Amino acid sequence: MTEIESNEAEFNHAAAATLARIERALEDADLDFETPADGIVEVEFDDGSKIIINRHGVAREIWVAARSGGFHFKRQAGDWIDTKSGEPLYDKLAALVAAQGGTTIRF
């Protein structure tokens, strides 16, 4: 396996584990969500709005699209960190869910 293939496999494993953790938290919070394709989680709220979380393999990031904007998270020291604000993914996602859906979510 080449270094590029190894890095890609490592990214895919880390992203899959993260998305699975997000799905478990959404289930625990009793939120409505779907996984329309591998690497995509769509959360739908009562007002019809959505938050979409997806794995972006080319950039090796996890992307989040919410009513308040789009956010990119890069793996750093074992955590997914917002490339602009430096905020951890789970903290940002909890804040986005609270702001958009009025629901508390814990990871």
Image (tube, rainbow, N blue to C red):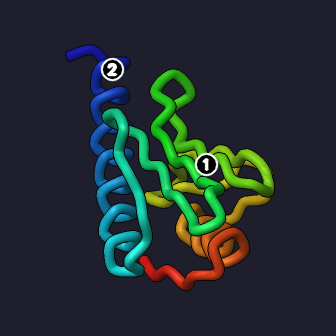
Q: Which residue is mark 2?
A: 3
Q: Residue 95 sits in which quadrant?
A: bottom right
Q: Which mark is residue 41?
A: none
In this view of the protein, which residue sits in the foreground, 12 or 64? 64
Q: Residue at x 65, y 47 (%)?
A: 65
Q: Residue 36 sits in which quadrant?
A: top left
Q: Position of residue 101 (x, y in %)?
A: 63, 73
Q: Residue at x 37, y 73 (%)?
A: 25
Q: What is the three-letter code of the residue carrying label 1? A: Val
Q: SS of the residue at dot 2? A: helix
Q: Position of residue 47 (x, y in %)?
A: 65, 65
Horizontal side of residue 67 vs 26, given as left or right:
right
Q: Position of residue 41 (x, y in %)?
A: 43, 48
Q: What is the three-letter code of the residue carrying label 2? A: Glu
Q: Which residue is mark 1?
A: 64
Q: Residue at x 43, y 71 (%)?
A: 31
Q: Residues within 10 Å of mark 1 (few under 14, many from 20)?
A: many
Instruction: Choose the circle earlier in sequence order: 2 or 1.
Output: 2
Q: SS of the residue at dot 1? A: strand
Q: Position of residue 16 (x, y in %)?
A: 31, 46
Q: Residue farthest to the top?
A: 2
Image quadrant containing the C terminus: bottom left
Q: Residue farthest to the left?
A: 1
In this view of the protein, which residue sits in the foreground, 4 or 56? 56
Horizontal side of residue 26 vs 81, given as left or right:
left
What is the spatial separation of the Cα atoms under label 2 and label 1, in whole angstroms? Answer: 28 Å
Q: Classify 47 as above or below 105.
A: above
Image quadrant containing the N terminus: top left
